[in-house]
Image (cartoon, helix red, strand yellow):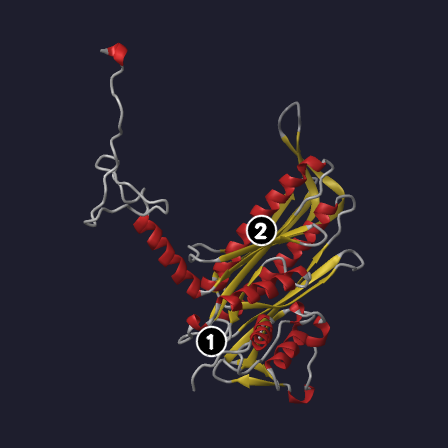
Amino acid sequence: MKNQALPRGATLAITMFVLCGVASLATAQFVVPHAQPNPESHRGVSDPSSVKVSENDALDVDVVSGATEQDAINHAQNLLEEDGGVKAIATGSGLGFVSTYKVSYSHAKNNVNLSRLQQRLAAVQADLLAKAQLVKFLEGCSIEGQEKIAESIQALDSETQQDMNRTMTAEEQRKSTVAGLIRGTVTYDFRDEPEGEYGGTCTVSVVTTPRTRGQVAAGTRPNLVHASDIQMLQTLLLAELKSGLMPPNGGRTILLPGGGVAWVGFGSALVRENRDPRLRDAAIEMAKGEADLRAESALHAVIKGEDIEYSKEMQSNFDSSLKQYEVSIDLLSGEEEARTLEETEEASMASSFYKDTVSSKVKGTLPPGCMKKEFRTDDGHWQYCVYIYEPAMTAAARKAAAEMAANSPFDNTNNSGPQYMTEPDGSFKRGADGRLIPKSLGRGRVTEDEDL
């Protein structure tokens, strides 16, 4: 069947549908709840009777399925609500996974900048930890451990003493490290609930499927996507971000009408409040730079993947003692003296240390032709930056770059050799025979009258 042009209204509707996280035009499997005007209406299970959890014998995991991918993901998310973790789901493109993590944050009493930063950091941490869980589930982790128990007994007998001391020390050290490359994740749901008893909580769920990882993108024809489609995509994405329902940072894989694929990365930064209005412009400039860097990293991560590293380590110590005597040193003679205690002294102490660290690393080169858009939220508190990349843009950008390089008077002249005349657009002037015209060496008198 030949491709037929879609009416503008139909294209807009389809693009809106795709932007909300639809897996494909054919299957229309799921939408991203936090990007909708009414998120709660998309978090429920529409057909509970069709939801089931069955074991995949080949992979030895339980797989959640439902009448739609939306139902499967939401049921898996409900199962993960309290304790977090990862669940496998059945999707139209193959086996997918849902990972959920919740992070708490507190409110600063006297500094609104700190409150907003803590809120944002909780969202970023929840997103990273949800991805780290996913890496651990898919790739496993390395474990290091050491446990040591030492006991010592000392006895002292003399004509006047018959005493003993016993001490016991227990030490445990454990470390778990997760590292891996993750790509094609979609931030499926994001919930910020700031009105808790002691602060707020941010909960993030990420989803990855073969479709979001690009396994079905082969054979697409990006040249079918018109520039107007990209512009509409940009407009609709900005509307989602301005709604305040999106996480502070993130990326998306977008399927466009006609089978084209586009990628989006976005980032935000706090526009800090300051008592001096003269520093307002400086705060905005700083926020723009930070948001730009985060958006670039997010776009790179969604296209090529991001390295997630998550480590946990703990150390616990326990000391106990039974003492019937103590040893002291005589300050005058320098000799040791053992003194019997009136009663056996018993003492114990336990200490524990726990630390977890999560990091995300991206490194590489973004393709040319990325579209950039900046805006600030209506309340002026957050600066956003968005990058959109579609393969056809790269081809056009590279062609333009090649044309500029070919016609550049800087790249095509040699300061040590002859230089040539150029047109206003930078291209070289040519004579009737087609040859380049050397620059004039100048005109006019070289020596003035008084010098003769």
**Number of residues whose C-alpha sits closer than 10 Å to that of mark 2, classed few (under 14), some (14–19) or many (20 or more):** many
Q: Position of residue 375 (x, y in %)?
A: 62, 53
Three-letter residue code for mark 2: Ala
Three-letter residue code for mark 1: Gly
Q: Position of residue 369 (x, y in %)?
A: 44, 58
Q: Quadrant of the N terminus?
A: bottom left
Q: Position of residue 150 (x, y in %)?
A: 57, 53
Q: Which residue: 66% across, 28% down?
A: 330
Q: Which residue: 74% across, 53% down?
A: 106
- Inspect this view and state whether residue 3 appears: yes
Seen in the image, is 228 located left or right of residue 405?
Answer: right
On residue 431, which mark appears?
A: none
Instruction: Between residue 287 and residue 157, name the one nearer to us.
Output: 287
**Number of residues whose C-alpha sits closer than 10 Å to that of mark 1, classed few (under 14), some (14–19) or many (20 or more):** some
Instruction: Between residue 448 and residue 179, name the one nearer to us.
Output: 448
Q: Which residue is mark 1?
A: 259
Seen in the image, is 93 located left or right of residue 246?
Answer: left
- Inspect this view and state whether residue 142 appears: no
Labels 2 and 1 touching (C-beta < 8 A): no
Q: Is residue 330 shown above or below 422?
A: above
Seen in the image, is 12 located left or right of residue 164?
Answer: left
Q: Quadrant of the C terminus?
A: top left
On residue 291, which mark appears?
A: 2
Q: Position of residue 79 (x, y in %)?
A: 66, 76
Front: mark 2 or 1: 1
Residue furthest to the left in view is 433
Instruction: Between residue 204 and residue 32, name the one nearer to us.
Output: 32
| Mark found first going from the N terminus, 2 or 1 | 1
Tell me the CA gap for discs 2 and 1: 30 Å
Residue furthest to the right in view is 197
